[in-house]
Image (spheres, rainbow, N blue to C red):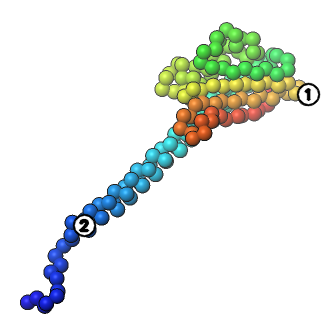
Amino acid sequence: MMIKGEKNNQGFTLIEVLVALIILSIGLLGVAGMQISSMRGNHNAYLRSEALQYAYEVADMMRANRTAAISSNGTINYTITATQDPATLLKTGIALTDLQEWRRGLTGASNPASGLPGGQGAIAVVANADNTWTVTITVSWAEGRLADDTTPSVVVETKL
């Protein structure tokens, strides 16, 4: 027996279902956006750690071949890019084979799956007054996702 004015409530209306679906869709889009942002940050951190690894690698090569690394007087600045002629690197005071190996790894020339996108390296060797040498290694790459189009880089300074 139904009382006058009382409605029979048996389920949801179509509008309530549509509102619930819209709210759920917005929530899922937010979760997907956070996942994409996390992946971008993770990839940038990966590239930064790879760049540090390349900088430490060439520093270790220079320590292993210290005589060749410090054979020049004063400051040597040079940049190694994928198009640079390896024969000209011999004049820099660091063993040619070490530089070629570092360049191949940095630019991904030996294995395209490795290396940094647009990877470049620069090394400066400065003779100090106390018979030590300060080496500054800069590794940079092309991120492409940064809003200001800057080229990220890492700088490692050590003594030989």
With respect to residue 6, does 160 lie above or below?
A: above
- Pointer 1 residue: 129
> Which residue does the image show at 70% across and 25% down from the upper left?
122
Q: Nearer the viewer, residue 116 or 142?
A: 142
Give the mark, 2 or 1, whose residue is nearer the N terminus.
2
Residues packed near mark 2 inside 10 Å, few (<14), some (14 to 19) or many (20 plus): few
Q: Quadrant of the N terminus?
A: bottom left
Residue sitting farthest toward the top: 87
Q: Quadrant of residue 152?
A: top right
Q: Amino acid at mark 2?
A: Ile
Q: Quadrant of residue 68?
A: top right
- Pointer 2 residue: 15
Q: Quadrant of residue 72?
A: top right
Residue 66 in view (yes/no): no
Give the side of residue 13 with respect to residue 149, left or right: left
Query: In front: mark 2 or mark 1?
Result: 2
Indicate the position of residue 87 as horizontal and vertical percent values.
67, 8
Indicate the position of residue 69 as horizontal and vertical percent values.
76, 19
Residue 144 in view (yes/no): yes
> Which residue does the image show at 82% across and 25% down from the upper left?
126
Give the side of residue 128 with respect to residue 96, left or right: right
Indicate the position of residue 59 as horizontal and vertical percent values.
70, 27
Q: Under tag 2, what secondary structure?
A: helix
Q: Nearer the viewer, residue 123 or 117?
A: 117
With respect to residue 47, does 39 lie above or below?
A: below
Q: Nearer the viewer, residue 151 or 2?
A: 2
Spatial separation of the CA atoms under disc 2 and disc 1? 81 Å
